[in-house]
Image (cartoon, grey):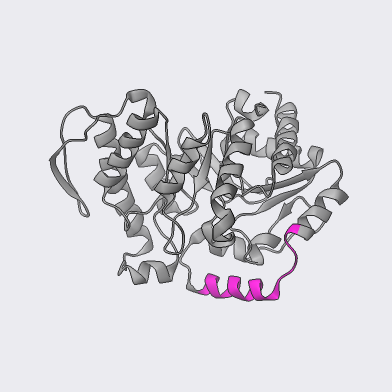
Amino acid sequence: MHSRAEQNSIELFSTCPPSNATDRERYLQRVIDVARWTDDYGYRGILVYTDNGLLDPWLLAQVIIQNTTSLCPLVAVQPVYMHPYSVAKVLTSIAHLYGRRMYLNMVAGGFVNDLAALNDTTPHDRRYERLVEYTTIIKALLGTPGPVSYDGSFYKVDKLRLTPPLAPELFPGILLSASSEAGHSAARVLGATAVKYPKPAAEEELPQDAGSSVGVRVGVIARSTDAEAWEVAHARFPEDRRGQVTHQLAMKTSDSVWHKDLSVREPATERGVYWLGPFQNYKTFCPYLVGSYERVGEVLAQYIALGYTSFILDVPPDQDEVRHIDLGFKQALEVAQW
């Protein structure tokens, strides 16, 4: 089974289940299952989260590689956790062992309490400046045959050499959150795919200076009819007062631009496709598109027409859901006439 999106240069990424959402006894198999489902449908990769409360993403990336044929782990990388040399060393080691390519999701921020516990008090925009230096060193180590020297405000290396060297064809794809101007600027400097949490398609526009590659983080629930899709959506993400309170508390302590932008929007009803219910009930961290294959496909086609070519989708609950999502993208590509 191969996704039509993959055949038409649209990159689809799934998301690895977070370790705090599944019982320990079942978690490993859950990761393997989700990876295999999306690998079978030709997804380019799978996002692996990182924060203080989750398992190490690099260990999960190895599990994913060992249980799939072509799926690329998209590992979230936070500078406070690892030196840039360590990131490059893990990447080249995995490439040497498995001959597989990886992707990096460069993360500037995180939960405020996580950063405070690590004594990281760097302001929002300065974190992106640090991320540029950090990623520049990683790219230089992976792409330069000789030793690397760099003298920046945050990092300094002197004649640092990476062994074993990385094969050029396995150089990682690099994505970066770009919902703020600081994020956009960092993505432009690094030549990274700029990823954002989209507005409704009718309100969305592609920044003129966005660079060569842009993407969105979004969930999809598509079925034969709108009514069936919304029934599934409400069953999977019911109203949760406790979740709403947690969401409100998180909004007050977050300096994330995308978090605040999404939080002030009203949830859509069955009359629309764009839905923030899961986000506002603290069930997931992205908007959802809900409706028939045709309606969801039309909205996806609008994003594609704007130039968004990478889609990072939410965690699929089962294999059949991956099939429904694929049908939505098939419709989108037919509408876009790719």
Determine the residue positioned at 64% across, 29% down.
5
Determine the residue positioned at 50% across, 60% down.
257
Question: In the image as oriented, which residue stretches furthest toward the left?
Answer: 158
Using the image, determine if residue 258 lies above or below residue 310.
Answer: below
Report the front residue among 255 and 283: 283
Dominant secondary-structure state across the stretch colored magenta: helix
**Position of 147 compared to 320: left or right?**
left
> Quarter holding the C terminus?
top right
Determine the residue positioned at 48% across, 53% down.
49
In the rendered structure, which segment of residues is drawn in magenta? 236-252
239 magenta-colored: yes
Evaluate whether residue 271 shows in this view: no
Using the image, determine if residue 194 lies above or below residue 235.
Answer: above
Location of residue 323 in the rendering, given as x and y in whole percent from the top left corner: 73, 37
Using the image, determine if residue 142 lies above or below residue 285.
Answer: above
Determine the residue positioned at 36% across, 36% down.
94
Location of residue 145 in the rendering, given as x and y in whole percent from the top left corner: 21, 27
Location of residue 110 in the rendering, given as x and y in whole percent from the top left corner: 43, 61
> Quarter holding the N terminus?
top right
Report the front residue among 186 and 158: 158
Location of residue 246 in the rendering, given as x and y in whole percent from the top left corner: 59, 73
